[in-house]
Image (cartoon, rainbow, N blue to C red):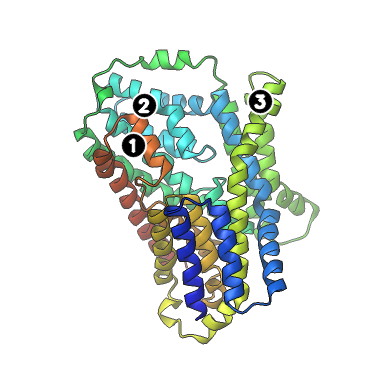
Amino acid sequence: MLFLVILLGVVFVVVATAVFKLHPFLALLISAFFVGIASGMPLLTVVENVNSGFGGLMTSIGIVIVAGTIIGVILEKSGGAYRMAEVVLRILGEKRPQLAMSIIGFIVSIPVFCDSGFIILSSLQKSLAKRAKVKVASMAVALSTGLYATHTLVPPTPGPIAAAGNIGATDYLGTIILVGLFVAIPATIVGYLWAVKVGTKIDVPADQEDALDYEEVIKSFGKMPSTFKAFLPIVLPILLIGIGSVAALVGDESGLTNFLRFLGSPTVALLFGVLASFFLLPEISEKTLSGWIGESLKEAAPILLITGAGGAFGTVIKNSGVAELLQEMDLGVLANGALFLLVPFLIAAALKTAQGSSTAALVITSSLVAPMLPTLGIEGALPLALVVMAVGAGAMTVSHVNDSYFWVVTQFSGMKVTDAYKAQTMATLLQGITTIIVTAILWFIFV
């Protein structure tokens, strides 16, 4: 009966968000109360679990999400994201334009949301397609899949951070970033290959239209920041988190080690990233310091609410008695972690396909599988990082008409919906399958 109650709670979230278009925050919150009450939990305890679950997750990752969003918006508005794209193009040249767009997407989407990243770089990919004499659709799919890979797998994007928080892996964010960057490479390559194979056969109106030349696009954007300033807000936090992770492995309590662990804590590292992003501001004024950051907070708010509600849902499930029930069951078939990885993958894929949001799929799935991890003995940096990768693999499978990103790609590239299903939707399916296979291989080798 307890499993049936939890299943009904999940079904409610999917139906409420996908069919009735209820905001995921309210859907998750209502479901949390339903699961708590229907499982026989005392009413006041249900309230305590909802409050502690929401607040507990905000305590560990709330500031991290806000800081990451601020960095992304400043990179977007200052031209920093564009500068990064320009640097990649300069290094790679224009012989493989689709590969260049995939790599640009891979880098830009680490701090910038994939929707925003695609919109920012849309004119660039069209001008480069015209210059290199390749189809716009192939460039669009290469860019979109590169953006999508890191969006679902690499912090400080909110989805992977929320998943890490839900399964208790916030302390291992450095490992998750490194593993995410590695796992996102095959996913990006598959997207690139599909873009070349299928995208080159799709015609869009932009193929017949005149596009600004590459140099004109760069000039039209205005004065852009230096390469160093553009990359610093991304590189600095990742470097600090990496140093902090190494210091934590040392294990001693010396002053230097504690200081490095302080600098490497995700909250402090991302705040340093925010400070580094201030070098990108074209002016120190109310428009930038208040307007741009205010816009960042508006973008972060729904993510924080969904993440917090997911934490509340997860805490209620965790304290409903499901962990004890799982301990009494024979889970031997899942004791092999590589096989267990299919569980979060399939749940996240079902949620993503049903309701469209990768972030919601990451939050809900991680909440559901969290009680199972201690029972199966899955703990430590690398195993938990690979669980996050499995959830992320599902959360990219698949992007179609109920996903806002699908419409961003179709509208800005000019692809018909039927063509977008062949190119974009199939590419995300292949990315998800590739990611879960790579994740399972890493588990077999290292865990």
Position of residue 321 in the picture relative to residue 208 (left or right): right
Position of residue 4 in the picture relative to residue 381 (left or right): left
- Dot in front, 1 or 3: 1
In percent of the image, x 52 and y 62: which residue is there?
A: 366
Position of residue 437 in the picture relative to residue 204 (left or right): right
The correct choice, above or below, for 186 with respect to 411 in the image is below
Q: How packed is label 1: few (under 14 Cα within 10 Å), some, or many (20 or more)?
A: many
In percent of the image, x 55 and y 15: which residue is there?
A: 223
Residue occupied by mark 1:
142
Instruction: Please state which amino acid type lies under the numbered disc 2.
Output: Gln
In percent of the image, x 79 and y 56: which residue is there?
A: 254
**Residue 237 on image: x %, y %:** 62, 42
The correct choice, above or below, for 69 with respect to 23 in the image is above
Mark carried by residue 125: 2
Marks 2 and 3, Cα distance to the nearest angstrom?
27 Å
**Residue 241 on image: x %, y %:** 63, 48
**Does the image show residue 175?**
no
Nearer to me, 388 or 418: 418
Nearer to me, 361 or 179: 361
Q: Secondary structure at mark 2?
A: helix
In percent of the image, x 51 and y 67: which residue is there?
A: 9
Marks 1 and 2, Cα distance to the nearest angstrom?
10 Å
- Dot in front, 2 or 3: 2
Marks 1 and 3, Cα distance to the nearest angstrom?
30 Å
Q: Residue 99's quadrant in the figure? A: top left
> N-terminal of the two: label 2 or label 3?
2
The correct choice, above or below, for 133 with respect to 341 in the image is above
> N-terminal of the two: label 1 or label 3?
1
**Residue 225 on image: x %, y %:** 57, 21
Circles 1 and 2, Cβ within 8 Å, touching? The answer is yes
Q: Secondary structure at mark 1?
A: helix
Residue occupied by mark 3:
279
